[in-house]
Amino acid sequence: MSNTKTPAATIADSNVVSKYKAAADVTNSAVRKVLAACKEGAKIIDLCKLGDAAIEVGLSKQYTKDKKMSKGIAYPTSVSVNTVVCHFAPGDNDDGAEQALATGDVVRVQLGAQIDGFAAVVGETVVVGASESNPVTGKAADAIAAAHYAGEAIQRLLKPGNRNMTVTDRVQKIASAFECKPIQNIVSHEQKQNDLDGGKQIILNPTDEQRPVFPSCEFAPYEVYLIDVYITTGDGHAKKSERRTNIFKKTATTYQLKTKAARAVINEVGQKFSKFPFTIRACDDERKIRMGMIECTKVGVAQAFEIHEEKPGEAVGQVTFTALVTPNGVERITRGAAFDPKVVQTDKKIESAELLELLQTSTKIKKPVKKTAA
């Protein structure tokens, strides 16, 4: 028998690209429905359910002839409001589930879909009731604008040959222009089939201890990245929330679990969600899953997506997207509502010639013109 491993599927294969883009179509449609529903009076739990349902409906219309192909939620809908930074996907009985949005609330929505293990994830920030006649100003505008331009810069810097720490430095400069900082311990990852946490990583605000030891890497053609940008008007130190964690995922770590409950739970989770994040609310027996997750997370066979919070009075802007790195450029395949400077009106701006030049460059790569023989 041959021990040769099957080569990993990459976007060098047009069929893989098609699956990524089909998942992106589902993701983009779902997030736009949730963003449009972020109106005064809308409840967080209803918005989360709306997003998850929209993903399921969208996936039901993709690759309908292949009944065995895996399709599902790659990231459950989370709706994080004001000081709650991320990962808020409550169950029906959790504190905050019935919270109704109010005009002026800063809302971050994140969700994603996967087809055959190829995932497309998106995260966007919206302010309830904002419009050209009622624009976003102050700290909220600063954070949202900084996150937007950071995302635009990252897309351009993902071109083959560039390095991850260059991204770190440029994003920090952009955030500084808006008197903001990236939130610490937020890491973007290379994506692979059935894995949102691939080998290469990008950190936007490393601590003094992290910077010298964080693995340096160079971007290459046919890689896929899940970019996570969280920019705050605070000091960059979001704290762990006391709110109950509801998003988990199975990791690649193997361990002989001691309890029967934990073994049953990790098997069920693996069969139903593979290694993609899921919400407890999506499980048949929430109590059983939550009990089993105690040991699973303790020994590392499962990861808890803990909720974090910013200090009162500060604002956080999020931009999350999936990007395909190709020899022809970097394609951002997920996006929610387009950034509108008429709605988000900050009194700050980028003045660095270096950063302005970067933002004006194309996301495509110009190939050198071949000289014809004389």
Image: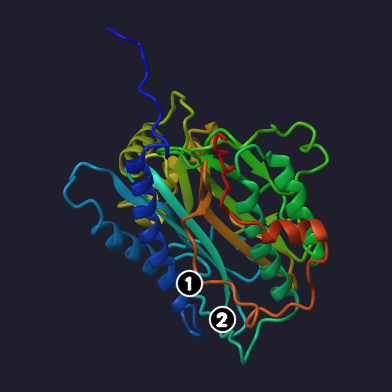
- The dot on residue 128 is 2
Instruction: Let me know if residue 286 appears in the view.
Output: no
The structure's colour scheme is rainbow
Q: Say left or right for 370 vs 274.
A: right
Which kind of residue does numbered mark 2 sit on?
Answer: Val
Of mark 1 and mark 2, the one earlier in the sequence is: 1
Task: Name the element at disc 2.
Answer: loop
Q: Nearer the viewer, mark 1 or mark 2?
A: 2
Measuring from the top left, give residue 12's x and y in whole percent: 42, 37
Taking 202 as reference, is 35 left or right? Answer: left
- In the displayed structure, would residue 331 be above or below residue 89? above
Image height check: is 50 above or below 120? below
Which residue occupies the foreground of this view, 321 or 314? 321
Q: Which residue is mark 1?
A: 44
**Residue 32, position in %: x, y?**
44, 71
Residue at left offset 52%, top offset 50%? 323
| Residue plotted at (76% across, 37% down) | 210
The image position of residue 92, as x and y in percent, is 41, 66
Image quarter for residue 69? top left
Real-space Cα separation, disc 1 to disc 2, in angstroms:
13 Å
Name which residue type carries label 1.
Ile
Image quarter of the C terminus: top right
Q: Is residue 324 visible?
A: yes
Residue closest to the far front? 374
Q: Is residue 328 above or below residue 138?
A: above
Q: Is residue 359 above or below residue 157?
A: below
